[in-house]
């Protein structure tokens, strides 16, 4: 079953064409890792999927609903997509628990009581229940990113997108964040992950996509794309990062 379908997606910033026609279909529960050189348009692509950027051309469908249709309520569509960035962007003036409760309560999707219950459940999932009443600055980077994941999950999204979620972390904290993501994948979440963690992609992804200069160069199961790339650009890239 198709969860997300992208057809001929283009995005330009003034004269700079960043995405040059991307087609992609992701099925429910699929875990897709996107790899590729810096500047190739990976973040722009994720931002388009979430309509943080408006595509210049092309269509994006989620559950067969055209989210690029101006008639549709973008905010409502966006609620179904959880997004985790390199920078955790937690609200510094709110405790961990309040960070997680904020969006569902503000959008009146949950009462404060329901949101709090859910926050504890999510903190259990990311292993941080004991940090519920702590402020973000008291947490390590890895802990903050786990809270950011919990916060995204609080909206009960259908799809989770990650843009280099471990790139800003000290090496010793990368594992704990990837561990949470791995569990999420095992629980059947549909995930799109931009990452330089090739080992993680090899282990967890159903499909790896290599992107360069605004197009998909090569895609397939990790065994193929990572262990046996066909395209010279993919080979060159993997040689640099592995
Ligand atoms: P990646 O995530 O693969 O490193 P990005 O999507 O961040 O690549 O960027 C791709 C290209 O688009 C870069 O040349 C970048 O400078 C440009 N770009 C990204 N966002 C903007 C923007 N808001 N305005 C102008 N140029 C942008
Ligand atoms: Mg990027």
Image: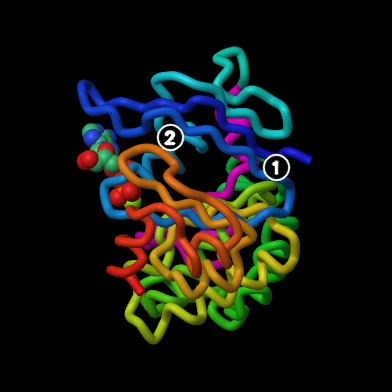
User: Which residue is identified by label 1?
Assistant: 109
Q: Is residue 4 visible?
A: yes
The residue at the far left in this view is 15
The residue at the far top in this view is 71
Q: CA distance from mark 2 to mark 1?
A: 22 Å
Q: Is residue 74 left or right of residue 213?
A: right
Mark 1 closeness class: few <14, some 14–19, many ≥20 residues within 10 Å:
few
Q: Tell me the tag on residue 78.
A: none
Q: What is the x, y in percent for residue 110?
A: 71, 47
Q: What is the x, y in percent for residue 179?
A: 57, 77
User: Which residue is identified by label 2?
Assistant: 52
Chain-order first, disc 2 or disc 1: 2
Q: Is residue 83 left or right of residue 87?
A: right
Front in this rendered view, residue 144 or 15? 15
At x 58% / y 67%, what residue is drawn? 223
Element carrying mark 2: loop
| Residue 78 highlighted magenta (yes or no) | yes
Q: Quadrant of the C terminus?
A: bottom left
Q: What is the x, y in percent for residue 16?
A: 22, 28
Front in this rendered view, residue 161 or 230? 230
At x 40% / y 52%, what residue is drawn? 231
At x 63% / y 47%, what residue is drawn? 105
The residue at the far bottom in this view is 172
Q: What is the x, y in percent for residue 185?
A: 67, 64
Q: Quadrant of the N terminus?
A: top right
Which residues, given as a range, are shown in magenta?
Answer: 73-102
Element carrying mark 1: loop
- Give the label, 2 or 1, closer to the camera: 2
């Amino acid at each position: 079953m198709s969860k997300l379908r992208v057809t001929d997606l283009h995005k330009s910033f003034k004269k700079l064409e960043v995405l040059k026609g991307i087609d992609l279909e992701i099925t429910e529960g699929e875990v897709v890792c996107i790899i590729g050189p810096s500047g190739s348009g990976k973040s722009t692509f994720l931002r388009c999927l979430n309509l943080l950027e408006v595509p210049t051309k092309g269509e994006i469908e989620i559950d067969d609903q055209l989210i690029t249709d101006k008639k549709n309520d973008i905010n409502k569509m966006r609620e179904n997509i959880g997004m985790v960035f390199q920078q955790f962007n937690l609200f510094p003036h709110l405790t961990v628990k309040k960070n997680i409760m904020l969006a569902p309560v503000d959008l009146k999707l949950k009462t404060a009581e329901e949101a709090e219950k859910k926050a504890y459940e999510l903190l259990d999932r990311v292993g941080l229940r004991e940090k519920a009443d702590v402020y973000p600055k008291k947490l390590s980077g890895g802990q903050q990113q786990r809270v950011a994941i919990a916060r995204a999950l609080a909206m009960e999204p259908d799809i989770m997108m990650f843009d280099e979620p471990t790139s800003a972390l000290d090496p010793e904290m990368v594992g704990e964040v990837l561990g949470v993501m791995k569990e999420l994948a095992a629980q059947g979440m549909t995930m799109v992950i931009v990452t330089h963690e090739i080992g993680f992609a090899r282990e967890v992804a159903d499909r790896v996509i290599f992107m360069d200069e605004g197009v998909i160069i090569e895609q397939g199961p990790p065994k193929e794309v990572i262990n046996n790339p066909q395209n010279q650009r993919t080979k060159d890239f993997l040689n640099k990062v592995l």
